[in-house]
Amino acid sequence: MPRTLLILGAGTGGTMLANKLAHTLDHDQWQMIIVDQEPEHYYQPGFLFIPFGIYRPDEVIRPKQRLLPASVKLIFSEIALIEPDQQRVKLVKDDQVIPYDYLVIATGSRIAPDEIDGMLGDGWYQNIFDFYTYPGAVALAEALKNWKGGRLVINIAEMPIKCPVAPLEFAFLADWYFAQRGIRDQVEIIYSTPLSGAFTKPRASATLSRLLDEKRITVIGDFNISEVDAERRVIRSYDDQEIPYDLLVTIPPNMGAEVIGRSGMGDDLNFVPVDKHTLQSKRWENVFVIGDAGNVPTSKAGSVAHFMLETVVENLQHHISGEPLTPSFDGHANCFVETGYQKGLLIDFNYEVEPLPGKYPLPTVGPFSLLEETKLNHLGKMGFRWVYWNVLLKAIDLPISSQFSMTGKIS
Amino acid sequence: MTTLLDTLAFNDEGYLLNWQQWNEQVAYEIAAEEGIELTDRHWIVIHFARKIYAENGDAPTLRQITKQTDVSTKEMYTLFPDGPAKKAAMIAGLPKPTGCI
């Protein structure tokens, strides 16, 4: 009887992994099953552009079925419970139980607006929006179109969040959007964050702060939101500061899937504790994690899931053959940061090295400039959507190394 | 006069370099420098933080503290004003929590 490799989640990480393993696993000995609750795959980096009318909503959706290899069995169902001690997963659909030999968790992270008092009250999707979900981004596009101006407050509730540069990009694009509409002078843009500055890493934070300043975006740091008072239109912090808003764009706390919590596999945010170099679960040796479902201390971003892929595939194979695991994942993250006016920055970093200026080499199209606003970085960001659907998800090798490299960087 | 804290090594941000050199007297003195007088409620948090660090090698986040002790977030801000998780770690003799990326 063939052994079973079960993947939970057919998002960015799960899809790439299924495509990669389709070529490497021996199909006589292995069956691969992937479970997901939704039929659509969303290109999540595109959510940023929907509120400003840069992308149409339909440009970010494809059916999951078409993105997966034929050799994987795809089941659409909610997951009722994971029982790692029994090596099985219970599904909601038809009360199915799937025993597995190896499990890869790719259930991602999601926003949890209910974690903030008052967030989901009368103002939700009236003058309070998120842009980390498809419905949020689409509703916000409609609201922005009709907005006459006032105080736009962007608030990050709590770290860590998926794609930690996206809120900054939102602020930059908002500045550009209102300027194009001729109402920039009627809009005040406030960027409030629990961090002390614009970003988590010092060199990038300095560059990004300068840009925020140039674009007349006010940063309020060390702001830890405790509640939304939708009636008075203010957000309040735990130390009783208040920020009034007319339009609130929130990045609510990000958490792992509820099933991780229910199954007793997560930390306080339902992220799965995982070895940060091998990506193996800290508790169950036949469980691995890809993407932002785990608690590794690097950015929760698609590029990171991509850089994790090699490590997960290698270590699955090592474990199957009874060999020691390779501690090859180094926290590598790589993000284009859209800054408006058809320009962008590129940052590249890992666990040890913060984003640095310099050049990022890439055959044919590159090099891209690091930590510097250029048109080419913007084109890179826009071209990435094609790369995502056609190369990244299919796990076709990109001409860039999974490991971080100092080549071209100025330290 | 040499104080107890003068005999210990701290980093630029004021976090103790070796968490094993900590004792309760050290906590009282770091807290005093931060203008905090330690009460039983502070000690619940401090002991919890040291327990988590011993287990995970990382000081707890604010969320971990408030979910796993009976101290609420609001109370944390009263006990340890200006960045409660960081300040609690500092007084507990631990490195700054790495929670945010």
Image (cartoon, helix red, strand yellow):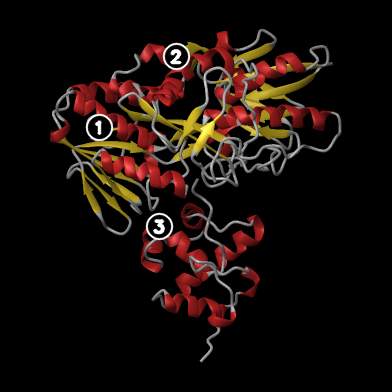
User: What residue type is disc 3 on?
Assistant: Thr
- Residue identified by numbered label 2: A61
Q: Nearer the viewer, mark 1 or mark 2?
A: 1
Q: Position of residue A268 (x, y in %)?
A: 53, 47
Please rate how many residues cluster around mark 2, counting C-alpha atoms within 10 Å: few if below 14, some from 14 to 19, many from 20. some
Q: Residue at x 50, y 54 (%)?
A: B61
Q: Residue at x 76, y 37 (%)?
A: A326
Q: Position of residue B87 (x, y in %)?
A: 45, 65
Q: Position of residue A57 (x, y in %)?
A: 36, 15
Front residue of this view, candidates A152 and A9 = A152
**Tag 2 secondary structure:** strand
**Tag 1 secondary structure:** helix
Determine which quarter of the picture holds residue A252: top left
Q: Position of residue B27 (x, y in %)?
A: 52, 76
Determine which quarter of the picture holds residue A150: top left
Q: Nearer the viewer, mark 1 or mark 3?
A: 1
